[in-house]
Amino acid sequence: MIGDIFLLIFCLLLILLSAEIFTNGIEVFGKRLSLSQAVVGSILAAVGTALPETILPLVAILLHKGQAGHSIGIGAILGAPFMLATLAFLMIGVTSVFSRFLKRRESFAIDAEISSIKRDLIFFLIMYSAGIFLPIFIKQHFIVAILLVIAYIYYIYLTFKGESNQILYEEKLYMEKFLGQLLPVKKFKGFFSLMQVLIALFIMIEGANGFVEALQKVAFNFGFDPLLFALLIAPIATELPEKFNSITWTFKGRDTLAMGNVTGAMVFQSTFPVSVGIIFTDWQITGYALLSACLAILAGLILIGEILLKKRISPITLIFSGSFYLIYALLIIKPF
């Protein structure tokens, strides 16, 4: 029991460390390629950290045949956007308030590029709503899946084309700090920054897997219901990369990268994984699965509403999004 708790803490620290290494590497890599903050946050970081939870439904649906595999796959597909729209936003909001009290930022407000975040949220709301509700009316589900993939490609095009500031922060690559005397890191900074990103991503994935396993053992030892664990706790761990990357960037005042990492992942998770679910399962979204999708859409609507009306993002709004997760948790726990 003590060993499992120790492993849980160790894996959490491992994820935190790898998140710091990842954000450092992806910033330097984006700077070397002269990419904008929107591209780095909403595409490179978002897709990179979304890979673990994207692989899970693919394995469940394609390799584990039968209703059980399909159910796990659909749950994983719908769980990702829900966690991002609730807990990830909550953690960004809390971090911004905390860093303000520590005087690491000038105000409580989220100083992100509103245009890029608005674009991400609009795409998410349209694509995710289409993925959830269009198959009810269109019998040829593959048509919806193809439209979602095309929409994501168009989103990438608009993100590259859209107005966004270049990365202003010139941090020294960690590999250069620690291995600069042994390897020609400074000369091939683009290559080594990419290597650092991939290494950090691998450590992050392994840390998240270890976290889930340790959490599962601790939950079992405390007599926590396995079903509740699957619905409420496991999805948190699969989204840890996005959450901790965004916390790192928010704490440093790099809000465009922090928000883009989450909203970009929301767009990705609402297109490619949903397309897989639509094509390879019966895609009957009902009950708690439908509720999670509706709450994710509602959280997105509230945030886009604030952006359209007030031209800003308040940490209070982001923190309020976390309440949807608590509501969902209470509704699931109550029958037990």
Image (spheres, rainbow, N blue to C red):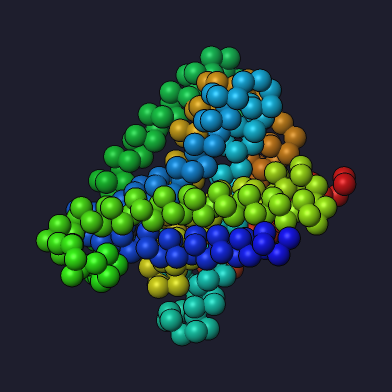
Q: Is residue 149 left or right of residue 328?
A: left
Residue drawn 60% across and 38% down? 76
Residue 133 rendering spot, x and y as whole percentages: 60, 29
Q: Is residue 300 visible?
A: no
Looking at the image, residue 288 lies above or below residue 213 = above
Residue 211 rendering spot, x and y as whole percentages: 59, 55
Between 329 and 171, the one lying in front of the other is 171
Q: Is residue 45 left or right of residue 31?
A: right
Where is the N terminus found, in terms of image quarters?
bottom right
Residue 98 rendering spot, x and y as whole percentages: 54, 77
Looking at the image, residue 326 lies above or below residue 66 = below
Q: Is residue 263 left or right of residue 42?
A: right
Q: In which quarter of the image is residue 320?
A: bottom right
Residue drawn 70% across and 44% down? 231
Q: Can residue 6 be seen in this view?
A: yes
Residue drawn 53% across and 14% down? 140
Between 103 and 129, the one lying in front of the other is 103
Q: Which residue lies furthest to the left in this view?
A: 187
Residue drawn 72% across and 31% down? 286
